[in-house]
Image (cartoon, rainbow, N blue to C red):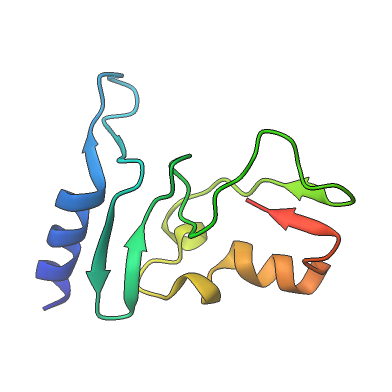
């Protein structure tokens, strides 16, 4: 069921935060298989299957997307999320969307 899947995901890729204002936070490098594919975080705690250097790649402008479950792409594969769609629209050869 959807509820059981969400509970499994939340118990695997999130942890309670020591920061009371956050309540919970992502677990770096954690992932779980969901009906739509893998859900999880990279080493920088972003929902991504790529790792990023501190500096952007040469010739690319970096764009950061911050948001809630709509940005996360709740219940959809990574390739269909807003950040990935934006990167495709802007042109991945010139923009790196985080």
Residue 27 position by quadrant = top left
Please identify the residue farthest to the top as the structure is shown: 19
Q: Residue 20 appears at what percent x and percent y? A: 27, 20
Q: Residue 79 appears at what percent x and percent y? A: 53, 74
Depicted 82 relative to depicted 1: above or below? above
Residue at image position (59%, 66%) is 82
| Circle count | 0
Depicted 86 relative to depicted 37: above or below? above
Residue at image position (48%, 62%) is 70
Residue at image position (78%, 47%) is 57
Taking the image as shown, residue 12 lies to the left or right of residue 26, namely: left
Depicted 94 relative to depicted 81: above or below? above
Q: Nearest the camera: 57 or 7?
A: 57
Taking the image as shown, residue 28 lies to the left or right of residue 6, namely: right
Depicted 20 relative to depicted 38: above or below? above
Q: Residue 15 appears at what percent x and percent y? A: 21, 37
Please identify the residue farthest to the right as the structure is shown: 59
Image quadrant occupied by the N terminus: bottom left
Q: Nearest the camera: 77 or 70?
A: 77
Q: Residue 89 appears at what percent x and percent y? A: 78, 73
Taking the image as shown, residue 21 lies to the left or right of residue 9, namely: right
């Amino acid at each position: 069921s959807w509820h059981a899947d969400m509970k499994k995901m939340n118990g695997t890729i999130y942890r309670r935060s020591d920061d009371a204002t956050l309540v919970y936070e992502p677990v770096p490098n954690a992932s779980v298989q969901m009906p739509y594919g893998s859900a999880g975080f990279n080493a920088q705690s972003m929902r991504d299957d790529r790792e990023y250097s501190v500096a952007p790649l040469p010739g690319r402008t970096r764009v950061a997307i911050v948001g809630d479950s709509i940005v996360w792409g709740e219940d959809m594969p990574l390739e269909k999320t807003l950040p990935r769609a934006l990167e495709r629209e802007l042109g991945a050869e010139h923009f790196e969307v985080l």
